[in-house]
Image (spheres, rainbow, N blue to C red):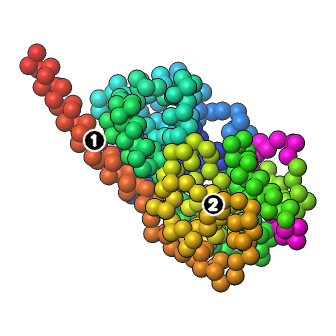
Amino acid sequence: MRLVVFGLTLSSSWGNGHATTYRALLKAFAARGHDVTFFERDESWYADNRDLGEPDFCRLILYKGLNDLARFGKRIDQADAIVVGSFVRDGIPLAKKLCARRDSVTAFYDIDTPVTMAKLTRGECDYISADVMPQFDVYFSFTGGPFLKWIENRYRVKRAVPLYCSVDEMLYRPISAKPKWDLSYIGTYSPDRQPTLARLLIDTARKRPGMKFAVAGPQYPDGIAWPDNVERIEHVVPDDHPAFYAASRFTLNVTRCDMIEAGYSPSVRLFEAGACGCPVLSDAWNGLETLFRLGREIVICADTADALAALDMPEATRCGVAKAARARVLAEHTGEHRARELEAYFISAGTRSSNRRIEAELRESVA
């Protein structure tokens, strides 16, 4: 299969979760014998922070704008399937042009589903629109559960299906390292996540001055009062994630408000930390129990007291949670699992698309 993807970024993991998601998925998809081309708009903020050179699993094409895509017309025209991702600049006119084609399966991959729905409701979404969504053969969503049926009904989407993030298990794996932090966190600053981060990590650090903590990620305001035992790290490239998790007794997952409200919206950090054998403390949301056994494979924390109790758990229990989480991730959430799902969805959508195309041609011939 010849797959073409227009995504936010593959080349840079700085300030986003799209890059590692695409890398794990497309690497595994290519390993199944498919040809993959990824089109990324050449944005300055990613150009200054690229952590992936020329990938060996796909062709990465950086383009300047929609007009620049004309020189790649043949490659696009030969695609069997085309995916447009969320937060792609000029995504609406791009999607309209691509969906007008009749020889390719087309899909929208929403890596920000609850955020997208909120933007659409406010009339502020500039990368997808209500009139374009029904034109795609399939709508892939980072969010699963009953929310997808609502999307189908509200936006007349032909088929909405979950395509969760995943992990490259060859990169994300346990390594030997001396623990440096008792609790760590990786995540770009977000105002709606900050109260939970403050409650579960910053306040916890203040109550455990003898423990060490770390917060890694860009764009945090200068005015945040970090305790002395919290180390700030601007950015950790994916190749260094396993070492970061290996140096953490626990790591923290904090979910954005829109995703908590929608439920069934796992962060890629859950799978990456799990694959590295680092136990995760997480806030609670509907659907998390369908991905991990609560209390056995992941530890739920509602407040500072819960975080303190988790940090004090016996070492044997901590190791048991880590081992169980890794087993779950490897059994259900690797790039290979998602690549198989993607392949099956394309085959199914391609069959329906072909049937519609034949029906349209028959109607035209009769007319």
Q: Is residue 308 visible?
A: yes
Side of 335 relative to 319 (left or right) = left
Q: Which residues are magenta?
A: 208-224
Residue indicated by mark 2: 282
User: In the rendered image, which quarter is residue 229 located in?
Assistant: bottom right
Instruction: Report the residue at 63% width, 57% height from top.
Output: 283
Instruction: Report the residue at 87% width, 53% height from top.
Output: 226
**What kind of residue is marked 1?**
Gly
Whether residue 186 is situated above or below residue 16 in the rendered picture: below
Residue indicated by mark 1: 350
Q: Residue furthest left?
A: 366
Q: Secondary structure at mark 2?
A: strand
Residue 279, image x and y in percent? 64, 70
Distance from label 1 to label 2 (Cα)?
38 Å
Q: Nearer the viewer, mark 1 or mark 2?
A: 2
Residues marked 1 and 2 touching at CB (< 8 Å) = no
Whether residue 367 is situated above or below residue 351 in the rendered picture: above
